[in-house]
Image (tube, rainbow, N blue to C red):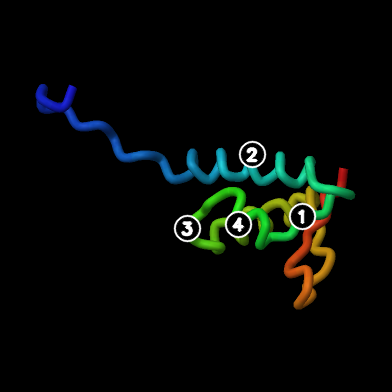
Amino acid sequence: SAGDGHQQPPPDPTEGQGLLTQRFVRLLQEAEHGELDLGHAFKVLAVKHIRRIYDITNVLEGIVVISFLTNSPINGLIYKHLS
């Protein structure tokens, strides 16, 4: 407890990123035609910095789970699930 002199260890940032990645992949799997607008993902996942979403997309592109589809002023950045 807080009064016994023991402090909780700080949260592991990779754990939070891992959970965020799982939520992102779930959104992608549920997206129509497997296509996900990053602006929509940013809002739904309620992250503070879009950089966290970019980190996820960079890793998923690197392991060929997703592919960059388009960047249009109307639709924004769209990624496609490759399963």
Q: Mark 1 or mark 2: which is in front?
A: 1
Residues at marks 4 and 3, CA–CA distance in whole angstroms = 8 Å
Looking at the image, how many numbered discs can be counted on the residues?
4
Q: Mark 3 or mark 2: which is in front?
A: 3
Image quadrant in which the C terminus is located: top right
Residue 35 lies, with reference to residue 30, above or below; the image says below
* Numbered label attached to residue 22: 2
**Label 4 vs 3, first from the N-terminus:** 4
Q: Secondary structure at mark 4?
A: helix
Which of the two residues, 71 or 64, is positioned nearer the viewer here? 71
> Callout 1: 10 Å neighbours few (<14), some, many (20+)?
many
**Label 3 vs 2, first from the N-terminus:** 2
Image quadrant in which the N terminus is located: top left
Residue lying at 81% horizontally and 58% vertically, measured from the top left: 67
Q: Amino acid at mark 1?
A: Leu
**Do residues under tags 4 and 3 come within 8 Å of each other at their CB atoms?**
no
* Numbered label attached to residue 42: 4
Q: Secondary structure at mark 3?
A: loop
Left or right: residue 52 versus residue 39 is left
Q: Amino acid at mark 3?
A: Lys
> Callout 2: 10 Å neighbours few (<14), some, many (20+)?
few
Q: Secondary structure at mark 2?
A: helix
Residues at marks 1 and 2, CA–CA distance in whole angstroms = 14 Å
Reading the image, the residue beneath label 3 is 48
Q: Secondary structure at mark 1?
A: strand
Residues at marks 3 and 2, CA–CA distance in whole angstroms = 17 Å
Reading the image, the residue beneath label 1 is 36
Q: Amino acid at mark 2?
A: Gln
Residue lying at 56% horizontally and 62% vertically, measured from the top left: 50
**Label 1 vs 3, first from the N-terminus:** 1
> Callout 4: 10 Å neighbours few (<14), some, many (20+)?
some
